[in-house]
Amino acid sequence: MVTRLALGLALGLALPCQAQVPVAPDTAMNAAAMESMDHPMAEPHMRMTAPWPGSAADSARGAALVALIRRALGRYRSVDTALAEGFRPFHPEVPQPIYHYTNLMYGLEARFTFDPVHPTSLLYRKNGDGSFTLVGVMYTAPRAFSDSALDARVPLSLTHWHEHIDWCVPPKGQDQRWAERRDGAPVFGPHSAITTRAACDAVGGRFLPLVFNWMVHVNAFASDDPRVIWGEEPATR
């Protein structure tokens, strides 16, 4: 299993820490992070890149990227191959619509360069018989990247890169508070109505302005439909 600290280093978990080195989130934080990655379009805890005007060049770049992913990464249809080559599942014991198999070295590499055949994560759908179907890949990029730098990796006219932002989470050692609700809604995590430090302080929480680095899904194995390939949520049916 991917360790919590290692996953934080690979994905860029932006948690309070010393010297800006990510620290290991608690188990409940992991579960919330996992859930938020499975539903990346949730607002208001999402920052997405604005769509750019389309162009023939972008369409050609996108088609070439999808073709490369399918050609070079098709071997990962076998989960055993992914495991043998360093991909590890993030909390496989927790039922998820889409499972992220993360390669720590590729996640660290993505901070400095972009290699499309080295995705930070492989995205799998779990089938009723317990087998896994490869649906796509997830790429990451440093949180400081400009839109132009992100576009150089995956065109902004085709999809949205996104960041998870403005989380209020319980203080360390108070995991039981993840269950708190007010007016029927969660007090903490990606579905909380709290979006400011002041409001988070008022409930005795920890405020995280940024939870992850930039990330984007390319669902190259899920469909031939561009709306699915470049959509942020892989098909789960």
Image: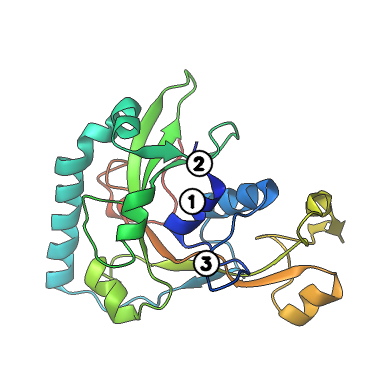
Mark 2, mark 3: which one is toward the viewer? 3
Q: What amino acid does circle 2 point to?
A: Phe
| Disc number lying in front (1 or 3) | 3
Would you say the residues marked 2 and 1 are in contact, meaning their CB atoms lie under 8 Å apart?
yes
Helix or strand or loop: what does disc 3 sit on? loop
Residue 142 image offset from top left, x and y in percent: 39, 70
Label 1 is placed on what type of residue?
Answer: Leu
Q: Nearer the viewer, residue 48 or 24?
A: 24
Q: Which of marks 2 and 1 is in front?
A: 1
Q: How crowded is mark 3: few (under 14 residues within 10 Å), some or many (20 or more)?
A: some
Q: Provide the residue designation for mark 1.
A: 7
Name the element at disc 2: loop
Rendered view: 230 above or below 162: above
Residue in the picture at 35% in, 58% down: 108
* Chain-order first, disc 2 or disc 1: 1
* Residue shown at the point (24%, 45%) measured from the top left: 224
Q: Quadrant of residue 110?
A: bottom left
Label pair 2/3, CB-CB below 8 angstroms: no
Pick out the residue farthest to the top.
129
Q: Name the residue under label 2.
A: 90
Where does label 3 land, which residue? 21
- The reply to whether residue 68 is visible in this rendering is yes
